[in-house]
Image (spheres, rainbow, N blue to C red):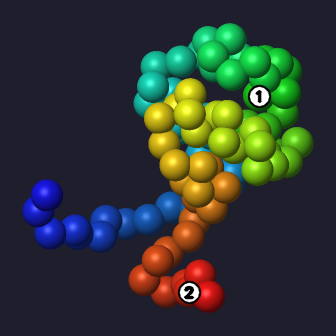
Amino acid sequence: MSEYRKAKKGIEVSVGESVRILRELQEMSQNDLATATGIAQSTLSAIENDRVRLGVERAKVLARALRCHPAVLVFPGWDMGQDSAA
């Protein structure tokens, strides 16, 4: 892989927005994701609208279905260049 280049422009997204964006990028409806994960469509809607917390276990299940790392869902705004995990 070639050298990593940071995006020129960044946007702030919430946890729910990150779930919605990744779901849409996978061309899945909320019903498709509900079927793939066993999480009710109404719960997915509440997560995407930031009315319900995602939680670690749901993040793991959703990450598998959305083919991403759970941290992408849980920490959508993390900037590795500025923040430290320690």
Q: Residues within 10 Å of mark 2 (few under 14, many from 20)?
A: few
Q: Residue at the location (51% across, 27% down)?
A: 24
Total numbered badges shown on the rendered structure: 2
x and y, in percent, of residue 34 in the image: 71, 17
Horizontal arrangement in the rendering, residue 17 relative to residue 51 (left or right): left
Residue 74 in view of the camera: yes
Relative vertical location of residue 6 with respect to residue 71 in this rendering, above or below: below
Q: Mark 2 is on which residue type?
A: Ser
Q: Residue at the location (58% across, 39% down)?
A: 63
Residue 45 in view of the camera: no
Q: Residue at the location (46% across, 77% down)?
A: 80
Secondary structure at badge 1 equals: helix
Secondary structure at badge 2 equals: loop
Q: Mark 1 is on which residue type?
A: Leu
Give the Cα distance between marks 1 and 2. Answer: 30 Å
Which residue is identified by label 1? 44
The image's mark for residue 54 is none
Which residue is identified by label 2? 84
Horizontal arrangement in the rendering, residue 12 relative to residue 52 (left or right): left
Horizontal arrangement in the rendering, residue 43 relative to residue 37 (left or right): right
Query: Which quarter of the image is occupied by the N terminus?
Result: bottom left
Which quadrant of the view contains residue 46?
Answer: top right
x and y, in percent, of residue 71 in the image: 59, 57
Horizontal arrangement in the rendering, residue 25 relative to residue 18 (left or right): left
